[in-house]
Amino acid sequence: MTSFTNTLSNRAASTPAPSAARNTTEFALGLPPRPALLSRRAWLALVALCVAIGIGVPLAALVAPESSAFHLSAYAMTLGGKLMCYAIAALALDLVWGYCGILSLGHGLFFALGGYAIGMYLMREIGRDGKYGSDLPDFMVFLDWHRLPWYWSGTQHLAVALLLVVVVPAVLAWVFGFFTFRSRVKGVYLSIITQAMTFAAMLLFYRNETGFGGNNGFTDFKRIAGFPITSPGTRTVLFLLTFATLVLAFVAARAIVASKLGRVVTAVRDGETRLMFLGYSPLAYKLFVWTASAVLCGIAGALYVPQVGIINPGEMSPGNSIEMAIWVAVGGRGTLIGPIVGAFAVNGAKSFFTAYFAEYWLFFLGLIFVLVPLLLPRGIVGLVETALAKGKRA
């Protein structure tokens, strides 16, 4: 009896717990280890930041007098909101480039499509307050149009516009991704195709007959949801909404990366052929991440347009998509927080250079593009992690 009891005890001790068994199985299948969603310290820092922004920004923008050093000006609000929109777009690109290994040079298209979707609503909100006093947008009256195109139907409703912000980038991304991923297009060839896609869309939107304002795009917005779009209260709400979206996007992206789905996506990046031999279908995983990234970019564009006050085909230019890749590379791809840092750093530098040394900005951007892969292959976040690791060893 004693020997039988000992045998059972030994078997129980040698049998791993369910979580350990699951991790062992996933390791055998080639999946990377499960990362933590966020550490306790990171959660506390995130909550503290949310409280500080949620309380501080309304006080600084609406309560503090303009003569006060604590007053948040309209320019500062617009700049901050714009940088956060860029950070959301960079975060979206990091999902496909940093974790799935797909370098997209066309994410500027999804950003612009989200902007155009909300821009259509904002143009309808102008109503008869436009230059020509017509229910049609001014550019349509100028072009002697007598009715709205069919694809403008329902855009006078904010809910319809928000639906378009999500659906249009999602459908385009899914269709594009399905055919390219199924054809096993990879690497630089895929990057070139994404660049060609956004360039073709830019040329299409430049044409007046497409019904999107041609070269000038959409501008001169008056209201959003019935409120004056340039009022301090509206600017504050848009700023806080953008900040909340950035936080939620970061947490959601982190949850995706920490899940089994995210680890399969990372395994696709590191060894797609091996994963196929193990019974996984990379197409479905790549399509999901690619489409989710496009939707996130579209949301960023939709938040960008009301704060900046304009959307035109220039937002689809290949250069804008390349800049997004630079933000991710500078911050550190495959980290999620790195692209946010990179977007703020590069665009903060852009605001400074274009204000004081406008003629040198493109040279500076090119220098970043060349030096970062050579000197900072892991970006700013990687540099900080290396410095902290050295400090601990010392």
Image: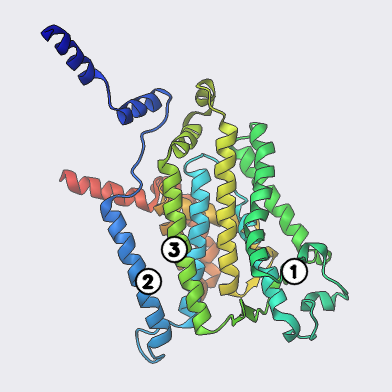
Q: Quadrant of residue 128?
A: bottom right
Amino acid type shown at disc 2:
Ile
- Give how far across and how far down residue 168 sits, in percent: 68, 55
In the picture provided, is 44 more to the left or to the right than 188? left
- 189 above or below 134? above
Amino acid type shown at disc 3:
Phe
Q: Which residue is the extreme one toward the front?
A: 1
Q: Which residue is mark 2?
A: 53
Quadrant the N terminus occupies: top left
Towards the viewer: 215 or 50: 50
Q: Which residue is mark 3?
A: 344
- Give how far across and how far down residue 257 sits, in percent: 43, 43
Counting residues from the start of the chain, the first of labels 3 and 2 encountered is: 2
- As measured in the structure, the alpha-carbon distance from the residue carrying label 3 to the one carrying label 2 is 16 Å
Q: Residues within 10 Å of mark 2 (few under 14, many from 20)?
A: some
Counting residues from the start of the chain, the first of labels 1 and 2 encountered is: 2
